[in-house]
Amino acid sequence: MAFELDIEHAQTTAPITLDPNWLAVTLCRRGVRAARAAHLVTSHTDVSATPLSGAWQEIERLKEEVEKSANEVAALNTALSDGVRTRDALALELTASRADLMKSETKLLQSKAAEENARHLALHDAVTGLPNSVLFSDRLNHALIQAERHAWRVVIMFIDLDRFKTVNDSYGHDVGDRVLYAVGQRLQASVRAGDTLSRRSGDEFLYLMLEAKDEASIENLARKIGDAVAEPFQVGALSLTVTASIGVAIYPKHARSAEALLKKADAAMYSAKRANRGDLLFGQVRKPEARGQEFIGSKSP
């Protein structure tokens, strides 16, 4: 190399001034490390005995600074690499956490849906989807509290399907359940919004009517319900017809407690059924022959 030859064959003892910046740049450009340069120089020249000693000291200083800078750069690169690895690890953890959060949210929604479904099943009839007797009793008790406070009339209609057992015995419970569902739909379409229609059990339904105006409007609604039930049901190829006997009890005329109202509506319904299936009877009935004195209403057409 030219630098090596210049040093090796230099004959002059006159001071030679080298620009340390130029020397460092030249060494770096030519790919000669400071250590290599020092080795070449010290192997051919006694640095302490030459006028170039100041330059070589500068080279040593530059070498130390370069090595120091190189070490700092290496340390910085290591720190950056560690930072990148830490960032990537955190990103993976964040992704996993988001996935876990989504799973938790999905499970929570499923749990809430299951809870709502369980609550619905606990308070509604499985065949018709109508409120069951538990929910009906709760709404009846609440209605009576409001009725006492606001001087309302509250009406209970006890609706029983006539000869429904024949449908089950003749065509099976699957057909019977389809008829019950259809009855529930017709009843729901016949009653007022805000009132409560319930399947009590078997072929029995209950209707809770709030703020009834008078007995004439009550009877008209009961007749509407009876007429809706009496329309033929089409179940597959079958055309089936059932009728309903309805007993009615009014708060506060016939009773003031929920239990007493239910008993009187039940008694009126059974009296209507015994007298003539499809009857509509009002009030408490103790004996079938006492109809003229203890209830209001007439036979459904």
Image (cartoon, helix red, strand yellow):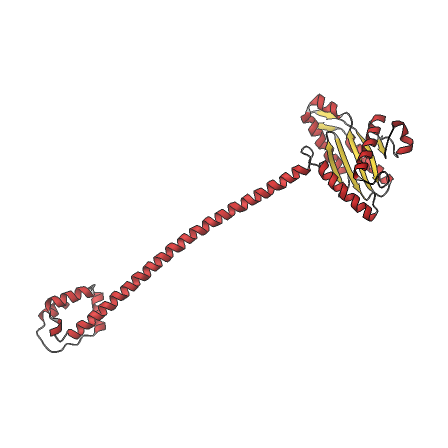
Point 70% across, 22% down: residue:
171
Q: Is residue 82 above or below residue 158?
A: below
Q: Is residue 100 above or below residue 62?
A: above
**142 or 199: nearer the viewer:** 142
Above or below, 240 relative to 119: above
Displayed quadrant of residue 178: top right
x then y, percent, for residue 208:
78, 39
Q: In which quarter of the view is residue 147 placed?
A: top right
At 18% from the left edge and 73% from the top edge, which residue is drawn? 55
- In which quadrant is the N terminus drawn? bottom left
Q: Is residue 32 left or right of residue 184?
A: left
Against 35, residue 241 (above or below) is above
**x and y percent of residue 49 in the render?**
11, 74
Say left or right for 294 vs 32: right
Q: Nearer the viewer, residue 17 or 203?
A: 203
Instruction: Give left or right: position of 95 versus 71.
Output: right
